[in-house]
Amino acid sequence: MTEKPIPPRPGLGAGSARLAEILRVDHAGELGAVHIYRGQRAVLGAVRGHERIAGQLAEMEGHEAVHLARFDDLLTTHRVRPTVMAPLWRLAGFALGAGTALMGEKAAHACTAAVETVIEQHYAGQIAELSDRDPELAAELSQFRDEELAHRDQAISEGAEQTPGYAVLSAAIRLGCMTAIKISEKL
């Protein structure tokens, strides 16, 4: 399910207010993703025999760190403040990552699949919304979305859907992500 593009708001400054929401929420999402992978690596990277998944997680974290750095730059350029929820999102991301990793490799992959599914849909809505107004940003978001999809596809190929209780775990993580998106846009 792709988010419907948000129609432009009327009035002076409406476009810049919407851009601020987009940049703030995307920055928050990438911040959370970096900390999810850090939490997963803190658990799985410390256990002998998990070197392969630890390497995969480090690579995905690296992609998210590049995205986060770009959004740091965009926040500065457009004079947009980050979400006030950033400290909580760091903690929640790390806890989610560590918690799913403690459940095992497949649960860690289930977390990635759930998060990246929501993020892909979120980016798709933003890309549709920005394609005429800001085609350069829409192109960057398209690249980021493609990388998020690659993470999701890798997680699924690694057995994410074989996690015991996958449907419930995935639904809970997706709901948490969607809630964080709505909060981060505004706060």
Image (cartoon, rainbow, N blue to C red):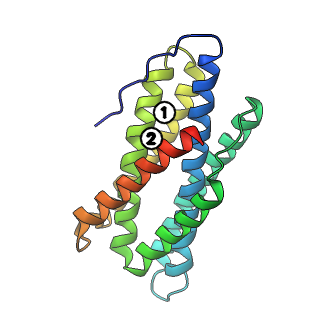
What's the residue at 43%, 23% (across, down)? Answer: 6
Residue 90 locus on image (x, y percent):
61, 62
Residue 140 locus on image (x, y percent):
56, 32
Q: Can residue 180 be seen in this view?
A: yes
Q: Which image quarter: residue 31?
A: bottom right
Observer-nearest of 25 and 46: 25
What's the residue at 55%, 68% (across, down)? Answer: 94
* Number of other residues with Cα within 10 Å of mark 2, as a class: few under 14, some 14 to 19, many 20 or more: some
Residue 49 locus on image (x, y percent):
45, 86
**Which residue has dot 2 on it?**
146
Q: Does dot 2 land on a helix, a strand or a loop?
A: helix
**Residue 148 placement, left or right of 185:** left
Q: Distance between the residues labelled 2 and 1?
A: 6 Å
Which residue is farthest top?
Answer: 11
Q: Can residue 149 be seen in this view?
A: no
Q: Quadrant of the C terminus?
A: top right
**Residue 68 placement, left or right of 93:** right
Disc 2 to disc 1: CB gap under 8 Å: yes
**Which residue has dot 1 on it?**
142
**Residue 153 placement, left or right of 9:** left
Relative to 9, residue 153 above or below = below
Three-letter amino acid code at the position of disc 1: Ser
